[in-house]
Image (tube, rainbow, N blue to C red):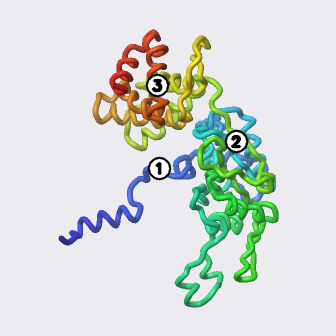
Amino acid sequence: MGTTHHETTQYEAREGGAGEALRPHAEETFADELKALAAADDRPRPERWRLSPWAVATYLLGGTLADGTVITPKYVGPRRIVEVAVTTLATDRALLLLGVPGTAKTWVSEHLAAAVSGDSTLLVQGTAGTPEEAIRYGWNYAQLLANGPSRDALVPSPVMRAMAHGMTARVEELTRIPADVQDTLITVLSEKTLPIPELGQEVQAVRGFNLIATANDRDRGVNELSSALRRRFNTVVLPLPATPDEEVDIVSRRVEQIGRSLDLPAAPEGMDEIRRVVTVFRELRDGLTADGRTKLKSPSGTLSTAEAISVVTNGLALASHFGDGVLRSGDVAAGILGAVVRDPAADRVVWQEYLETVVRERDGWKDFYRACREVSA
């Protein structure tokens, strides 16, 4: 059966990027804030930086400019961590953001690149199958076969493009990349050059180039960084949120941002449930109740802040599409169960024990207990 002109037009519009992106890049989402910061920024800027280090830190941590423009915080945590990360990028050292899953490594990486270079898309996503070409360069094989090796046939990697234009490249999940491919970065970071032996040429990094990598050493399937590569980085460890209030703030902010793009109800309607989700995650993660009186068994999962954000976002979607738009216990119970019980045997025992010894006895949590019991049955 043929495709109608109307259907073809709709398809072409989607392919062409018509409409609003589901997840715009940081430099697009916060373009007004970046523009206001650039206008107000009278401090020295490293070459090819869009903002001064002070303005980059303000963009991440939030603040109010002299003209009254409010800069929303992108990262909630110790100011010194952000200052060290920004300062590292202003030197010739690369930046490694290290932390357990869910500590906003990717989020911070993206916003740093957006503020420094105005472009967060020069990205290499690390996986077990990431090839050397993703970091160095590849070839257009049609041109290669037709005309032999040439600069026209060469396909630059995001790292090569960042070197040539003095911008910030990003490598996500560096420890998931095979060790021999990781070490491709050693020459780039130490000599600031990328040889192209097939052409007898090289690409030298121009001023403004730097690289941000993210990694965690707790997840499965990681490849330890060689000592030679690790020496090329300044490492900044991103901690888990220090207090429950800090984590609730992070979750509510991110859920609100995600919810706006999905036309979901406002997160403040469900602040009680957000606080419950955060409390459950923190107690099981720490192996101790908030009052310090009861020791708990911890499940096998990380129960990170990112997972709490996902649980609440899914709960808001349930409340919006199958409820009255107000986030309630029944909307988050299934998501919590899925986050906690990763190992069906061991984790289910941990969860049931937590429900019966902690949640059941907690004042004001009866509705939450019933909802969790219902989905756990």
Q: Is residue 294 above or below residue 183?
A: above
- Which circle, 2 or 1, is nearer the viewer? 1
Alpha carbon distance from label 2 to label 1:
23 Å
Residue contact at pointers 2 and 1, CB within 8 angstroms = no
Query: For this rendering, which residue is in front, 370 or 172?
Result: 370
Residue type highlighted by circle 2: Ala
Query: For this rendering, which residue is in front, 288 or 173?
Result: 288
Query: For this rendering, which residue is in front, 13 or 300?
Result: 300
Which quadrant of the rendered structure holds the C terminus?
Answer: top left
Q: Which residue is mark 2?
A: 57
Q: Is residue 19 above or below residue 319?
A: below
Q: Earlier in the sequence, mark 3 or mark 2?
A: 2
Where residue 138 appears, as percent x and y from the top left, is: 61, 74
Where residue 234 appears, as percent x and y from the top left, is: 78, 48
User: Do we see residue 71 in this rendering?
Assistant: no
Find numbered disc 3 in the image and state the secondary structure of the residue it sits on. helix
User: Do we see residue 137 in this rendering?
Assistant: yes
Alpha carbon distance from label 3 to label 1:
37 Å
Q: Which residue is mark 3?
A: 349
Q: Residues within 10 Å of mark 3 (few under 14, many from 20)?
A: some
Which residue is most to the bottom?
147
Which quadrant of the rendered structure holds the N terminus?
Answer: bottom left
Alpha carbon distance from label 3 to label 2:
44 Å
Residue type highlighted by circle 3: Val
Q: Residues within 10 Å of mark 2 (few under 14, many from 20)?
A: many
Q: Which residue lies at the image location 42% right of the left edge and 25% below the top edge?
A: 270
Residue type highlighted by circle 1: Arg
In the rendered structure, find residue 23 and report the number of the disc placed on it.
1
- Which circle, 3 or 2, is nearer the viewer? 3
Find numbered disc 2 in the image and state the secondary structure of the residue it sits on. helix
Find numbered disc 1 in the image and state the secondary structure of the residue it sits on. loop
